[in-house]
Image (tube, grey):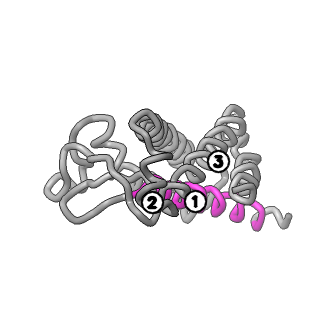
């Protein structure tokens, strides 16, 4: 998990060009992500008896709530970045804006029903108005957005982190660093 946090720190450094407070916020979100991933890893590796021991009602509720809040916060960071790029407040090329929008839209699939109790706009005909929480036995905490699709918090985290790494790599390649 230390390597994952290091990745968050690396991408956070370049966030100051969008908003100086994003540096510490992205690091905080990264630390929370690492903590949530570690708890998810304990769950998916545990056998039935161990799950009962580590996953009491209070810990389930706390983990689910922290995961929910993480999704809402991460979405807002992506929304802000997409807006700043769209409004020309950065020198990023279109592919960077596209990558951020792609990540934001993936988050929206879960975030909209979590926050607004309605399906995300592009998925109104296929998705539930509520994202039902549960556990994906490969990744941990997840939400069912319809009868056949489950999206894990860790998948969203990976999408977010990879998008920020793309932003960082694009900036470095443009400046020869």
Mark 3–mark 2 distance (CA, rounded to whole Å)? 18 Å
Q: Position of residue 42 (x, y in %)?
A: 55, 55
Q: Residues within 10 Å of mark 1 (few under 14, many from 20)?
A: many
Q: Tell whether 93 sits left or right of 71.
A: right
> Which residue is disc 2 drawn over?
102
Magenta region: 152-173
Q: Residue at 19% of width from left, 44% of height from top?
A: 129
Q: Quadrant of the N terminus?
A: bottom right
| Residue displayed at 76% across by 67% down | 173
Q: Residues within 10 Å of mark 3 (few under 14, many from 20)?
A: few
Q: Is residue 12 above or below residue 156?
A: above
Q: Where does residue 19 sit, x and y in percent of width and height?
A: 66, 36
Residue placed furthest toward the front? 49
Camera-near label (1 vs 3) is 1
- Secondary element at image label 1: helix
Dominant SS in magenta? helix
Which residue position holds label 3? 90
Q: Check contact, mark 1 vs mark 2: CB within 8 A.
A: yes
Left or right position of 166 against 158: right
- Is 50 or 23 nearer to us in this picture? 50
- The residue pinned by badge 1 equals 163
């Amino acid at each position: 998990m230390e390597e994952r946090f290091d990745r968050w720190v690396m991408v956070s450094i370049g966030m100051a060009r969008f908003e100086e407070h994003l540096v510490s916020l992205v690091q905080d979100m990264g630390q929370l992500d690492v903590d949530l991933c570690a708890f998810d890893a304990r769950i998916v590796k545990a056998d039935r008896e161990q799950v009962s021991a580590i996953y009491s009602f209070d810990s389930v509720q706390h983990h689910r709530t922290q995961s929910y809040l993480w999704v809402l916060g991460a979405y807002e960071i992506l929304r802000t970045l997409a807006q700043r790029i769209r409004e020309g407040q950065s020198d990023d090329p279109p592919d960077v804006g596209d990558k951020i929008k792609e990540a934001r839209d993936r988050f929206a699939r879960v975030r909209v029903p979590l926050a607004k109790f309605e399906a995300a706009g592009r998925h109104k005909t296929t998705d539930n108005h509520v994202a039902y929480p549960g556990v994906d036995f490969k990744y941990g905490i997840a939400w069912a957005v319809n009868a056949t699709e489950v999206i894990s918090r860790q998948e969203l985290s990976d999408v977010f982190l990879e998008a920020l790494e793309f932003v960082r790599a694009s900036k470095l390649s443009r400046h020869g660093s």
